Image (cartoon, rainbow, N blue to C red):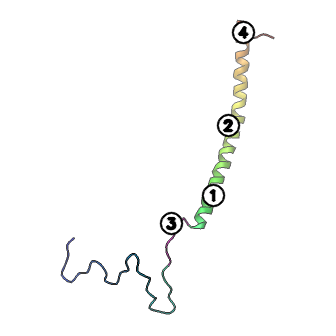
Amino acid sequence: MTWRRGEVWLESEMLWFREAVAAPAFAGIGPAAIPSLAPPPGLVASRVRRAAWERRRHLRRARTTAVALSPAVVLALAALLPIAWSRGKVSV
């Protein structure tokens, strides 16, 4: 990229840091809106809904896993009980 004769790299009518905003050339056009750094409100609401859905899904999966694993845990403990009785480790 090189400079060419007659080419202007900086606009001469560009506003610098502390200069006031110029009045619009046409009466019906107002100054340009300053873009916000915050996400749009619809996006925030969408993210909140998605986070709530993920929390509900995690809880639902945890309950399902607990219900599915509980018989296996009970059977494993029941299988270990006679071994403990035969070794004399369980006292009643």
Amino acid type shown at disc 2: Thr
Choose the circle earlier in sequence order: 3 or 4. 3
**Nearer the N terminus, badge 2 or badge 3?**
3
Q: Position of residue 80 (x, y in %)?
A: 70, 16
Of the residues shown, which amino acid type is indicated by label 1? Val
Residue at image position (63%, 62%) is 45
Residue located at (54% from left, 65% from top) = 38
Give the amino acid at mark 4: Lys
Q: Which mark is residue 89?
A: 4
> Magenta region: which residues?
33-39
The amino acid on which the numbered mark 3 sits, given as a three-letter code, is: Leu
- Circles 1 and 2: CB atoms closer than 8 Å: no
Residue 22: image location, x then y, percent: 43, 86
Disc 1 + disc 4, Cβ < 8 Å: no
Mark count: 4
Q: Which residue is mark 1?
A: 48
The Cα atoms of the two marked residues, 1 and 3, are separated by 18 Å
Circle 3 sits on which residue? 37
Q: Residue at the right extreme?
A: 92
Disc 2: CA contacts within 10 A as few (<14), some (14-19) or many (>=20): few
Residue 13 pos. (x, y %): 34, 84
